[in-house]
Amino acid sequence: MVNHGYLPIPAQNSQQKPRALIWRPSSIPLVSNLTNSPRDVALYALGIGACARDAVDVDQLKYVYHEKGQNFIQVLPTFSALFSLGSLPGGAGLPGLQYDPRLLLHGQQYIELYKPLPSSAVLKNTVTLAGLHDKGKAAILEIETKSYDKDSGVLYCMNRSTVFLRGAGGFSKSSQLYSYSTYPKDQVASVTTPKGQPFAVYEDCTQPSQALLYRLSGDYNPLHSDPMFAKAAGFTRPILHGLCTLGFAVRAIVKCICGEDPNLVKCVSGRFLLHVYPGETLLTEMWLEGLRVIFQTKVKERSRAVLSGYVDLHGLSSRL
Ligand SMILES: CCCCCCC[C@@H](O)CC(=O)SCCNC(=O)CCNC(=O)[C@H](O)C(C)(C)COP(=O)(O)OP(=O)(O)OC[C@H]1O[C@@H](n2cnc3c(N)ncnc32)[C@H](O)[C@@H]1OP(=O)(O)O
């Protein structure tokens, strides 16, 4: 996949205070092009654990192999989140906003899917800065990416990515903290998990090398691969990409609720509550409320919730 990747920002001293923010939301979208190929689709599926348990499971194999050729492999819905990776401005897009890249964490991801994703495409992205919030100890930045087919102009999907910039808040008056958003607050709000028994629970093991494999899908942030960088960021060792955890969770939902039909997924919303270490076991609990699946993913070894959110479906699988 071209044009994906963590924008390398020179490391700064983490003690350095961010400069006062003078950025105002821009209505002018940035435009970029990227391509994806069946190889990218298969590599991504492996990165989020497809076929890790069973290499001949036909339901999972279809995401990485097809007897008629790679163009026939199916695309998992969260693959579309990769389209937003190149959207993070490396400073130039946000005059005045300075942050330590080591302290950046992925906070939330919201995805709307409008068309089934093809296994190969040339896409045109438009990127807008959709929100900025001063939380005192942190700044929260929201970036919206719309991905179109470059030739036909068909809109495939929209991603809203929320990044949590630790140490970059405190740029506005503490009595009236700055908050701006171009969309309704409830669209990506944190969800409350239902009290009753979940409809389904799926357990999946991540591999100790999971982040090293997943990063090949385009997020080369050293937080996920470099032990020294991870320590400077406050972790004992490199952590898993938030979008990798989200990929595991939504793949579990596609398996347990969508009857392995990835095209039933209409919209995905997830909030990253806590980091995951590669090698930990993920338990995804799912509650079905009409056409909405509310989910929560926990790390089994630490009994801690690491991700919560919902997935809206076009319909229910006949396999249910
Ligand atoms: C364009 C595409 C860009 C994509 C780039 C992605 C790059 C990747 O390589 C990076 C990653 O994948 S990082 C790994 C995945 N993310 C994580 O592990 C983060 C896990 N979450 C945490 O650690 C904490 O929730 C933490 C630290 C996030 C917050 O915890 P606390 O500091 O305890 O916050 P708290 O005091 O509870 O709340 C403060 C205010 O912030 C809001 N908030 C909290 N968690 C949030 C979250 N996850 N997302 C968004 N907002 C969040 C709270 O609502 C609160 O605001 P308010 O006071 O107004 O309610």
Image: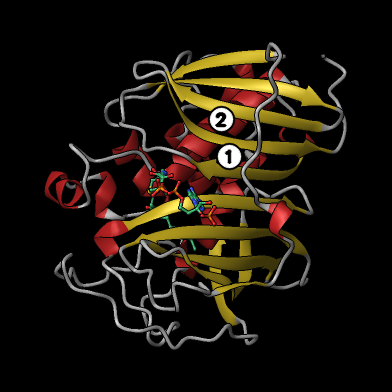
Q: Is residue 313 above or below residue 218?
A: above
Task: Answer left or right for 63 relative to 52.
Answer: right
- The answer, for residue 65, to whether it is visible in the render is no
The residue sitting at 57% across, 46% down in the picture is 79
State if disc 2 and disc 1 touch (CB < 8 Å). Answer: no
* Residue pictured at 28% horizontal, 64% vertical: 101
Q: Is residue 108 left or right of residue 231?
A: right
Point out which mark residue 70 bears.
Answer: 1
Helix, strand or loop for disc 2:
helix
Q: Amino acid at mark 2?
A: Ala
Q: Is residue 70 above or below residue 288?
A: below
Three-letter amino acid code at disc 1?
Gln
Q: Mark 2 = which residue?
A: 249
Q: Quarter of the image containing the C terminus?
A: top right
Q: Is mark 2 within 8 Å of ligand 1?
A: no
Total marks in image: 2
